[in-house]
C-alpha cells in the first residue's frame, strides 16, 4: 500500500520569500517516483517537478526544488522567491512500480497563500 | 500541443438525465485517466485506459461508464447520478512508452465541474 501525507492544510508566505511545503510518504515499492502538482482555482493540475527514488541529486526546476530525504521518506517542495501567482493548492503524489505504474496517489494538499 | 482539453467546463444535470464528459489530447499519449475530485480533497482515480483498453476500474459505480473510442479521445458517460456525485472531474493523459515507466508526468485538463441536482 502507498500513502502520501501532507500535514500542512494551509501555508502563508510573504512575496519574494521562500517557502517549504512538506510531504512524507510510505511505500513498499523499491522503485517509485514522486511528483508535485499545483492546482489553481481554475482546477487544472499543473506538473511542477519530479524526483525518482534512485536519483542521487535533488530535482530542481526553475524556482522549484525538491528536498528529497529517502531515509526519512520525505520529499518537500521548496519554492523560492514566491510570487502572487504561486497562490494555489499544492499536491504531492507518488507512482510506484509494483502497485500500478499507471496510477498516481495524491496527498491531501496544502493551500499556499502568497501575501503582497 | 501539450494540452488536454475537457468539455464542457461546467455541467448541471438532473438525477434522471444522461450526459457525457469529453476529453481530448493530441500528444500521442496512450494512457488516459479519469479522476474525481471533491471539494478540498485530492483527486481520486476512477478509470485508466491503456492503449485504448480499460486497464483499471477503481470500483466505480455503473452509473459512470467510460469509453475510449480512439487514442485521442476519452469519454465519461453519466446516467442516473446522485447529488453526491457532484465534483470536479479531471481527465489526464500520459506517455507510457514502457508500461512501467515511472517518471513520465501526467498532463491534466482543466476539468468539468459537475453539479447534480
Image (cartoon, grey):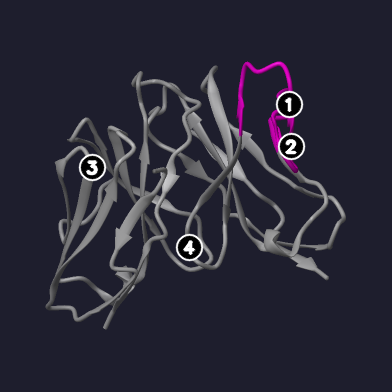
Point 34% across, 21% down: residue: B99
Q: CB under 8 Å between callouts 1 and 2?
A: yes
Residue count near mark 2 (Cα–Cα under 10 Å), binned few <14, some 14–19, many ≥20? many
The residue identified by callout 1 is: A58
Residue count near mark 4 (Cα–Cα under 10 Å), binned few <14, some 14–19, many ≥20? many
Q: How far apart are marks 3 and 4 (CA)?
A: 21 Å
Picture quadrant of residue B114: bottom left
Q: How far apart are marks 3 and 1 (CA)?
A: 34 Å
Span of residues in magenta: A50-75
Q: Distance between the residues labelled 1 and 2?
A: 7 Å
Q: Which residue is more in the foreground, A1 or A22?
A: A22
Residue count near mark 1 (Cα–Cα under 10 Å), binned few <14, some 14–19, many ≥20? some
Q: Distance between the residues labelled 2 and 3?
A: 33 Å
The residue identified by callout 3 is: B72
Q: Which residue is more in the foreground, A1 or B115?
A: B115
**Residue A82, percent from left and from top:** 79, 55
The residue identified by callout 2 is: A65
Point 48% across, 63% down: residue: A43
Q: Which mark is residue A43?
A: 4
Q: Distance between the residues labelled 2 and 4?
A: 23 Å
**Residue B60, percent from left and from top:** 25, 52
Of discs 2 and 3, which sits in the foreground?
3
**Residue B43, percent from left and from top:** 45, 54
* Quarter occupied by the C terminus of chain B: bottom left
Amino acid at each position: 500500500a502507498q500513502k502520501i501525507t501532507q500535514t500542512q492544510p494551509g501555508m502563508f508566505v510573504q512575496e519574494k520569500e521562500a517557502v517549504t511545503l512538506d510531504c512524507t510518504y510510505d511505500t513498499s515499492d523499491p522503485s517509485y517516483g514522486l511528483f508535485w502538482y499545483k492546482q489553481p482555482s481554475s482546477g487544472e493540475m499543473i506538473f511542477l517537478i519530479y524526483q525518482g527514488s534512485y536519483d542521487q541529486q535533488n530535482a530542481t526546476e526553475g524556482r522549484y526544488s525538491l528536498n528529497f530525504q529517502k531515509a526519512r521518506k520525505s520529499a518537500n517542495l521548496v519554492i523560492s522567491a514566491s510570487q502572487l501567482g504561486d497562490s494555489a493548492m499544492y499536491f504531492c503524489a507518488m507512482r510506484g512500480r509494483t502497485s500500478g505504474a499507471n496510477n498516481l496517489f495524491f496527498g491531501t494538499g496544502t493551500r499556499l497563500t502568497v501575501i503582497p | 500541443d501539450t494540452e488536454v482539453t475537457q468539455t464542457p467546463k461546467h455541467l448541471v444535470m438532473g438525477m434522471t438525465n444522461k450526459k457525457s464528459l469529453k476529453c481530448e489530447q493530441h500528444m500521442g499519449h496512450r494512457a488516459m485517466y479519469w479522476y474525481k475530485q471533491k471539494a478540498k480533497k485530492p483527486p481520486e482515480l476512477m478509470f485508466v485506459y491503456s492503449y485504448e483498453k480499460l486497464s483499471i476500474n477503481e470500483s466505480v459505480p455503473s452509473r459512470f461508464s467510460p469509453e475510449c473510442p480512439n487514442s485521442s479521445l476519452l469519454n465519461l458517460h453519466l446516467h442516473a447520478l446522485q447529488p453526491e456525485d457532484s465534483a470536479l472531474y479531471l481527465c489526464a493523459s500520459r506517455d507510457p512508452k514502457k508500461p512501467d515507466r515511472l517518471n513520465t508526468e501526467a498532463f491534466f485538463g482543466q476539468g468539468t465541474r459537475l453539479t447534480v441536482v
